[in-house]
Amino acid sequence: MNDKDRSSAVDEAWGTLPGELETELNQILLYWERFAVDREHGGFYGRIDDHNIVHERAPKGSVLHARILWAFSAAYNHTQNPAHLALATRAYQYIRDFMTDREYGGLYWSVSFQGDMLENYKQVYAQAFGIYGLSEYYRATQDAEALELALAWRQLIEKHSRDHLQGGYIDAFARDWSFLEVKRLSEKDENASKTMNTHLHLVEAYANLYTVCPSAELKDDIRQLWQIFDQKIIDHSSHHLGLYFNEGWKMDKRIISYGHDVEAGWLLQACAEAIGDPDIVDRAKINAVQITTAAMEGLDDDGGLWYEYDTEKQQRILEKHWWPQAEALIGFYNAWQLTGNSLFRTAVLKNWQFIRRYILDYAQGEWLWGIDEYGNPMPGQDKVGLWKCPYHNSRACLELLKRLGT
């Protein structure tokens, strides 16, 4: 193929991208509408496995429900489809009625399949996703109760989690917001006092809340969170992000997460743009290109993004999970918008081709958890679960459709 034919093929693929993304968005939402709704006990099932078998008695996670709330609220804001709003409302009502701690405030980590309190500790990560979902639901409905709940959870975070001495936020607390020794989000995470992941989704939540309920105080909180990233979390020598920190911000550099890098690049820029601070926006754009370029160290020739890199063993984790691919679509597109560099535009198309070839489950719907180094689906993983939600993939479709002007 000569250069002219290659350019024509790229232009053709770019031209079909909006329609393909719109179709995929509808397929994702249809899967959750068709399979994930728990009509007997309320809310959504806590787990559906990779064979599409519903585990009816699985615990229900607050992060799962908050992400469903965001996804269907954001989808409704794009489609104006009443079915999407109905599912957003279902998620909202379940969070309000079963996952909200009436005594101490905030979100439980999980409840039983029947809605009884199960894991009652307070992960700030979960509170952040609650605020993120509630603020998007408020954008869709103007429901004052939802906004009031989001603002109340923000106040709890500011009261209990914020470290006024050394900056940033402590990750987790007991049910009554007292000290909690074990703060890790999951078994794979380090037991760190402060993490990149919690700070990323907190600034994301605050920025979304700011767009529907702006205030000088919230704007300042977002600005300070953004500065924490610029000064503490981004390793400007490598342009990768640290994942785990102690209270004094000592960075653990053992793991590089390509997915979190590429997600943070575009998302931190979007948060800066939400508050309209020109100095921060300019700096955020520079960081976005540098971080996204660094994340491309994890790109394989097939267009897929490897999961992580272990700096001690000096080897990649040879898996390609679904969510880094979704974030890569946005991150590469954002970098192309900033630079006009065709390298990023090509990366968008190759990554989308990878997703369509390896990650979309055409037989049963939704996205597979991921593939191994040989291109085989990873067995025993969830289609729906505490971590497997319609957040990354629906957001990738929505974000690119917005940027493509459709």
Image (cartoon, helix red, strand yellow):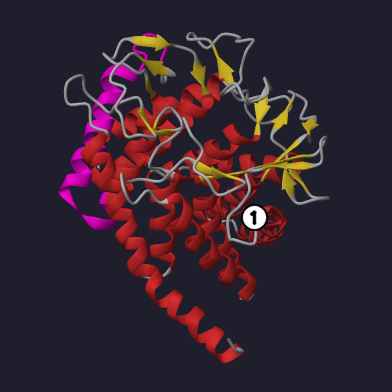
The reply, left or right, for residue 393 in relation to residue 345 is: left
The reply, left or right, for residue 170 in relation to residue 29 is: right
**Relative vertical location of residue 162 with respect to residue 291 in this rendering, above or below:** above
Residue at point 46%, 27% (across, down) = 127
Please indicate, yes or no, whether residue 310 appears anywhere in the rendered image.
Answer: yes
Q: Nearer the viewer, residue 29 or 365?
A: 365
**Relative vertical location of residue 158 with respect to residue 12 in this rendering, above or below:** above
The reply, left or right, for residue 142 in relation to residue 317 is: left
Q: What x and y, as percent, mark residue 225?
A: 62, 40
Q: What x and y, as percent, mark residue 403?
A: 44, 66
Name the amino acid, label 1. Ile
Q: Quadrant of the N terminus?
A: bottom right
Q: Nearer the viewer, residue 249 or 273?
A: 249
Q: What x and y, as percent, mark residue 282?
A: 65, 62
The quadrant in which residue 214 appears is top left
Count all numbered tags in the image, as a single digit: 1
Q: Which residues are magenta?
A: 76-105
Most common SS among magenta residues: helix
Residue at label 1? Answer: 280
Please indicate, yes or no, whether residue 406 appears anywhere in the rendered image.
Answer: no
**Relative vertical location of residue 173 with respect to residue 15 in this rendering, above or below:** above
The quadrant in which residue 245 appears is top right
Q: Indicate the secondary structure of the residue bearing disc 1.
A: helix
